[in-house]
Image (spheres, rainbow, N blue to C red):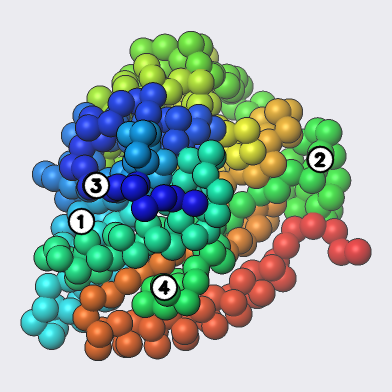
Amino acid sequence: MVSETDSFFFSNTIDDISKDDWNDCVGLDHPFTRYEFLQALEKSGSAVFSTGWQPFHYIQINNKKKIVVVCPLYVKSHSFGEYIFDHAWADAYHRYGLDYYPKLQSAIPFTPVTGERIIVHKILKNKNDIKNKVINNIINKAQTLNVSSLHFNFLRKPEYLNNNNNDLLLRQGIQFHWKNNNYKSFNEFLETLSSRKRKLIKKERSCIKDNNITVKLLNGVEIQKKHWDFFYKCYLNTTGKKWGSSYLTKEFFVKIGKNLSSKILLIIAYHEDQMIASALNFLSTTHLYGRLWGSIKHIPYLHFEMCYYQAIEYAIKNKIHIVEAGAQGSHKIQRGYMPENTWSLHWIKNKKFKEAISHYLDKEINLLDKEKKELEQFAPFKQN
């Protein structure tokens, strides 16, 4: 348990903490909460005040000045780059002459992956009690700030909440994840699918052979500057078409390539020895996280090969349990990625808006439960 002598503070830059102290608290497995990833976002100018992501990280230390709890936290001036949408809430505030922004946001910027947001050092016991206390500490701070609300995005289901945190609203979402049922090979996975879905995937995967494409999977020191240069070209091509703006700077990719390469899987497609497409993934011992992809040459089905099938094949070979393929996309179901619930927590300062949003979320959860059941009916697997 955290002792009464423990203290906490809020930091507007991760540079206030040493890399070793931060990573000793969060561990080295989950790539997105590691110091190297979060610092790269800040130092590259991707997640800073000027882009609407002012760092405001929560840090808790014990009486020996050891970090025992951290929570990545940001003061946001907009809702972009979060993937849990509250634009309707902001619009409602605006219609009533109130300001929704700034708000406090605990999230991994531009990264819709599940994980812990309040991270308690492994040496501590009673972690659930500690998390509840941390939430209260952050809420108390939010009460003193010019913010409308506090949000924790893409949590594992927060079953640790106690009655002292009944001001928090729970929101449900849906993503599509692939689960490794101890498959020995990609073909063994295919055998679990219906005949029609098996044929579909085989047809899509034939795009490699039919177009004389070679695919290389790069990790760690195998990823060279030329690969990052090409990937960033693909990234700009994709974001220009899809969003109209690019959140992440090239320096961000340079920094994670230098400092976090062991957690990166970069997939490159070649045609006649020329790079034509790439997909960026991150790794933990249990998960493969598909993040970004792009191509400079349109080839039918290449997107599915690079983003889904190569990820599955790598996960099987390396005994990785889960592949998270990013936000949204019901088309992933027929490729073996099934709907899974994601969770977020929300604290709303204004009492009337809290009540209105609470009613909205109750209805939304019922609709999403129904949607998830309907989506599961399209599972590609053989019927028992």
Tell which tag, 1 or 3, sits nearer the viewer: 3
Amino acid carrying mark 4 in the image? Asn
| Mark 1 or mark 3, earlier in chain | 3
| Location of residue 76 in the rendering, given as x and y in whole percent from the top left corner | 20, 56
As helix, strand or loop, the secondary structure at mark 3 comes to strand
| Location of residue 222 in the rendering, given as x and y in whole percent from the top left corner | 50, 12
Q: Which mark is residue 49?
A: none
Question: Which residue matches tag 1?
Answer: 76
Residue at 26%, 35% (x, y): give it: 14
Question: Which residue matches tag 2?
Answer: 182
| Location of residue 162 in the rendering, given as x and y in whole percent from the top left corner | 49, 71
The Cα atoms of the two marked residues, 2 and 1, are separated by 41 Å
Question: Which residue matches tag 4?
Answer: 165
As helix, strand or loop, the secondary structure at mark 2 comes to loop
Q: Is residue 76 left or right of residue 271?
A: left
| Mark 2 or mark 1, earlier in chain | 1
Is residue 207 visible to the viewer in this orientation of the structure? no
Question: Which residue matches tag 3?
Answer: 9
Amino acid carrying mark 2 in the image? Asn
Residue at 75%, 53% (x, y): give it: 197
The Cα atoms of the two marked residues, 4 and 2, are separated by 39 Å
